[in-house]
Amino acid sequence: MTALRVTTPPSPPPLPGGGGTDQAARLRALVHAAEPAPAPSPRRARAIAIASGKGGVGKTNLAVNLAIELARAGTRVALLDADLSLANADLLCGLPVGPHLGHLLDDDVPLDRIAREVTPRFTLLPGGSGVADLADLDPRRRARLAHALDEIERRHDLVLIDCGAGIGPTVLWLMDEADRTLIVTTPEPTALADGYALIKCAAAGTPRHAGERRWSLVVNHARSCEQARAVHARLDAVCARFLGISVPLAGWVPVDAAVPDAVIARTPFALREPRCPATRAVRGLAGSLSSARDDDPIAIRTNPPLMARLFGLRRASR
């Protein structure tokens, strides 16, 4: 049944000359009171960007396996491979070559021809590999990508955006479009320095959600929980000192021989080795992301001893 707005219409003023009430005015007021309430806008999926200051930190591998674990937990997830010139998420998933985002942006190929089902509830939208001019999108193609993102959000519960490495304008734009960003780093000093550079550039211009903290850190290839916490502490201290912000630790993934073996086999390690330490760590991160809402803190689910003690996503003013 259509919802009605129940209001009490004001009494109409008397007619000039004192001749009773204006029945037409009263009828119009009653009709207005019975107008159906506006339909709620379609629910939109949350969007989480996954970015890194440099390449080679395992960002795309994390994105693919995180999507698998989210889908395994019942979330309808789409992974947008937005590393538009050096995309390889489809390679990690063992998919054959097919239409990609470059075809959507330049050739008007429909979104449904690009979308590939990797596992039940996990849809991949491959990017373009070796297409140099896709690295920086012009306004026309950026608008087309934004339209595609809007359509993807309406079909899924969660959209993961695998950004290209570095601090390019498309990366910063995608981070700003997302509700949250996971910044992937490793214990290497170069990865930490470039991760800080990415945060600095993102903090310099975030028109949406001004004053909110929407970035958190994932430490990949850590030898222990203690090392991951130490890496986070160093980066967080630099951000606090020079940027006046704090970047919480969302999770960490241990060094695991199953990861490079799975890459060689072109099979995500979450499918090939569902009980390995790396898969268990990603599963913990997926659990925290799928259970969180945009306006709530993300409570990290621990998986001792691998997920011994992690920090959650908290909101704070910048």
Image (tube, rainbow, N blue to C red):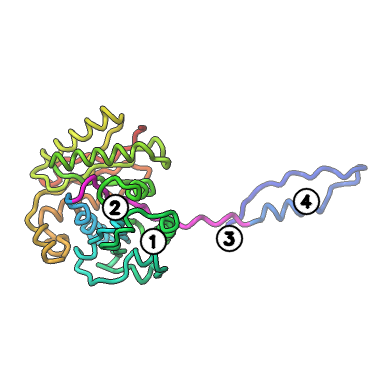
CA distance separating discs 2 and 3: 43 Å
Label 1 crowd (10 A; few <14 / some 14-19 / many >=20)? many
CA distance separating discs 2 and 1: 16 Å
Amino acid at dot 2: Cys
Determine if residue 65 is in view: yes
Between disc 1 and disc 4, whose residue precedes?
4
Tag shown at residue 68: none
Q: The C terminus lies in which quarter of the figure?
A: top left
CA distance separating discs 2 and 4: 59 Å
Q: Nearer the viewer, residue 57 or 4?
A: 57
Q: Which residue is mark 4?
A: 26
Q: Which residue is mark 3?
A: 2
Residue farthest toward the front in the current orientation of the protein: 133
Task: Name the secondary structure under disc 3.
Answer: loop
Measured as percent of width and height from the top left, residue 256 is found at 8, 53
Q: Which residues are magenta?
A: 36-55
Q: Which residue is mark 1?
A: 152
